Image (cartoon, grey):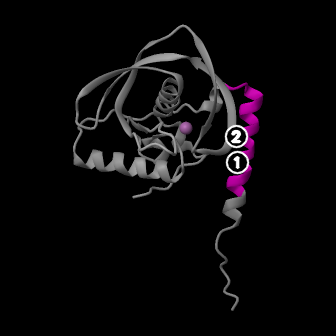
Amino acid sequence: MIRPLVILPDPVLRQVSEPVERVDDDLRKLADDMLETMYDAPGIGLAAIQIGIPRRMLVIDLSRDDEPNDPHVFINPEIVATGEQPNVHEEGCLSIPDYYAEVERPASVTVRYIDRDGERQEIAADGMMATCLQHEIDHLNGVLFIDHLSRLKRDMVVRKFRKLAVRDKDKAPPTRMVG
Ligand code: NI
């Protein structure tokens, strides 16, 4: 099932997500919904809080359009080591549509997590996977990629999305029926 995305400036995005306590069929169903929502958007990563669920879970699929899907589910992910080398990637976010900016982060990270079968796993990631994991784990802590930009840039983006949100509210359905 495709779930509605939470969009900036919704304060839900600033919530710190709680650890998952049990990996069961309900949780796997949620992971499937997250993947379906991400593929539909389309995006390459999605944290549960982006569909309004404050649980420490995220999904990632870095396969190209011409490749079969390669879904990954990370439950309670935790960065246990970061490389010293920095790396700059252009990032975007499904909760901040149509805005992209370069963000500097460590080029490699080691992440411990639980997979969809409830097994403990560890991944040493670099390249796009390292960037994506850090972006999504930020979401679990209420942090957005625009928080890594200068205050000036961040304020500009937030202002723009506040205006858009107000405009959408103005578009509420008419209360008067004109036939
Ligand atoms: Ni994001």
Marks 2 and 1, Cα distance to the nearest angstrom?
Answer: 6 Å
Q: Look at the numbered disc 2 and say if its residue's Cβ is closer than 8 Å to ligand 1.
A: no
Q: Secondary structure at mark 2?
A: helix
Please rate how many residues cluster around mark 2, counting C-alpha atoms within 10 Å: few if below 14, some from 14 to 19, many from 20.
some
Give the residues in magenta.
149-166
Quadrant in which the N terminus appears: bottom left
Query: Residue drawn at (42%, 35%), measured in percent from left and top?
Result: 17
33 in relation to 143, above or below: below
Query: Magenta stretch: dominant SS?
Result: helix
Query: Residue drawn at (38%, 52%), measured in percent from left and top?
Result: 33
Farthest residue to the top: give it: 84
Q: Secondary structure at mark 1?
A: helix
Checking the image for residue 162, the label placed there is 1
57 in relation to 3, above or below: above
Q: Amino acid at mark 1?
A: Arg
Residue 68 x/y as whole percent: 42, 44
> Can you identify the residue that label 2 sits on?
158
Quadrant in which the C terminus appears: bottom right
Residue 38 x/y as whole percent: 48, 47
